[in-house]
Image (cartoon, grey):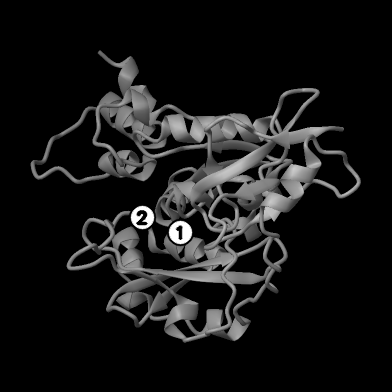
Amino acid sequence: MKYTFDNTSKKFICPNCNKKRFVRFIDLETNLYLDPIFGKCDRETNCGYFKKPCKTLAINNASTVQHNFIAQKESKIDTFHTIEQLQVSLQRYCNNNFYLFLTSIFDKESVQQTFNDYKIGTSKTWNGATIFWQIDNRNNIRAGKILLLDKLTCKRVKEPYPHITWVHSKLKLDNFNLKQCLFGLHLASNNNKIAITESEKTTVIMNLFMPEYRWLSTGSKQNFKYEILLPIKDKEIVAFPDKSEYEYWSSKANELNQLGFKIKVSDYLEKIDCETGTDLADIYLGLQQPSKTFIELTKDEEQIVNLSKKNSDILNLIE
């Protein structure tokens, strides 16, 4: 097989530095991109990532390609959190804003079971903060993302600054090599119906609304990529991007599907009149907000309301 660098101006997200400065290889016979891990980052000084498919494969203009770019940096050894670090956080839910918000809407037993399943912890970094642990399909604890959510709205607290950090940063683990995985990945092995959202809180909320799916989260739209999704490559995947992110996710899904993934991207939020950044949980939670005025419903109306909580599309069928 012969391949060469894409000589267009198109750039992709670098798998090493997450900057959109990555040039990929193209198969000269099929004119298709090779796997997203193969290519070079043009941030030669600050990144230097360079990975070829195989030393034995011929490459077009090999003498030019192999010597004009610096070699890929030596891979760091994966590091993980200890089970003790995780377990000590699985308490104090009375001081966890996310837990308090959920138990104001859902029954406490369901919320507690969801927290147990996803291994959601409480942090003392900020009063009421939540830890979303990232545990891979081999039960390695790869990361702990700390977020402060408003207990009344469940929105991220961004004032006077974004309240987000990592457990390894708070513990001052200087040699910790952060290599993320999907939030909830440890739960995916026995379920072929996978749904993916961007934020961790949306994954948790949708798991409570629609437990028939195994809900996972990328944590950011940049993490909707080959290396992060590889452990679920054999699954049927439906992705639910936030409002106005459909084109980005759909483009990435098309690339991944060429590599053997089975990803469908929902345009559900694009069809709804809502603000940019609205996510699936915002829509479902909107159906749960209590009215300030008591309205007596007929039995038929009560049945419609109950159905709409399970599938909001039902409202579109009613004139």
Res 106 label: 2
| Quadrant in the rendering for residue 70 | bottom right
Q: Say which quadrant the N terminus sits in.
A: top right
Marks 2 and 1 sit apart, C-alpha to C-alpha, by 7 Å
Q: Secondary structure at mark 1?
A: helix
Amino acid type, callout 2: Phe
Above or below 255: residue 211: below
Res 110 label: 1
The x and y percentages for residue 103 are 33, 62
Q: Residue at x 34, y 81 (%)?
A: 125
Residues 272 and 198: in front is 198
Residues 179 and 126: in front is 179
Q: Residue at x 20, y 31 (%)?
A: 297
Q: Say which quadrant the C terminus sits in.
A: top left
Q: Residue at x 68, y 50 (%)?
A: 68
Res 222 label: none
Above or below 3: residue 216: below
Amino acid type, callout 1: Ser
Q: Secondary structure at mark 2?
A: loop
